[in-house]
Image (tube, rainbow, N blue to C red):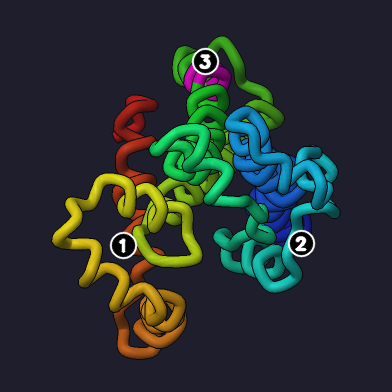
Amino acid sequence: MNNGTDGLLNIFIEYFPRVIVLLVCLPIHEMSHAFAANAYGDDTPRINGRLTLNPFAHLDVLGSFLILFQGFGWAKPVPINPVVLRRSSPSAVMWVSLAGPLSNLVLAIVTFIPLRLVFDLIKSGALTSAFFIILVEILFNFLRINLMLAIFNLIPLAPLDGEKVLEYFLPQPAMAFFNQIRPYAPLVLVGVFIILPYLGIHVFDIIMTPINNGLLFLLGAK
């Protein structure tokens, strides 16, 4: 292949998984929230058209842009009624919040199975076609983005899912402090992911490095 073809192939390998994440994984993530809320008796997501896999019902413009060009981002939050959910179960809000990251974890696990199979066949020499090498790279990128989304969304800062998960497990004495810092959580996120990189601290890389190393270890490539 010439340099031009190699460049286009590298762009495809990097961005194709991001497009799939945008059109498939984010809708599954958000619909998982909606499905869990509906299962607990809250029909707010269904009324607002969020109990669907249609990506256009879920995608956020800025979050989608970041997914495509930075490899991480978000969709529109699913509206819920915490009063209805807590009336159903004290842990309902926590489980509804956890449903999204869990969906990304499941997608990552499901992706790892064919990835490991194809990778082992390539290492053994049973598969030699360039197609399968490209397939491994695409599956690897798809898997690591899903793991990153699961971890990113579990950060215990609003408006991320981890806030409601942490809230459920916090002892009552800690809730007063948590409620004091809650309004500033979005500003903290802005500082962590937008301002800190200008100071040479790349939190995104801090998250992705152990993910990449862990996946390479599980694949037997490290």
Dot 2 and dot 3 residues touching (CB under 8 Å): no
- Image position, residue 184 (x, y; %): 38, 81
Magenta segment main secondary structure: helix
Name the N-terminal-most of marks 1 and 2.
Answer: 2
Residue at x-position 49% and y-position 25%: 109
Q: Nearer the viewer, residue 33 or 192?
A: 33
| Element carrying mark 3 | helix
Residue at x-position 58% and y-position 31%: 40
Report the mark closest to the observer, 3 or 1.
1
Task: Decide if residue 31 is on the left or right side of residue 207.
Answer: right
Q: Amino acid at mark 2?
A: Gly
Q: Residues within 10 Å of mark 2 (few under 14, many from 20)?
A: few
Residue at x-position 38% and y-position 46%: 212
Residue at mark 1: 206
Task: Decide if residue 160 is on the left or right side of residue 37.
Answer: left
Q: Which residues are magenta?
A: 113-118
Q: Is residue 173 magenta?
A: no
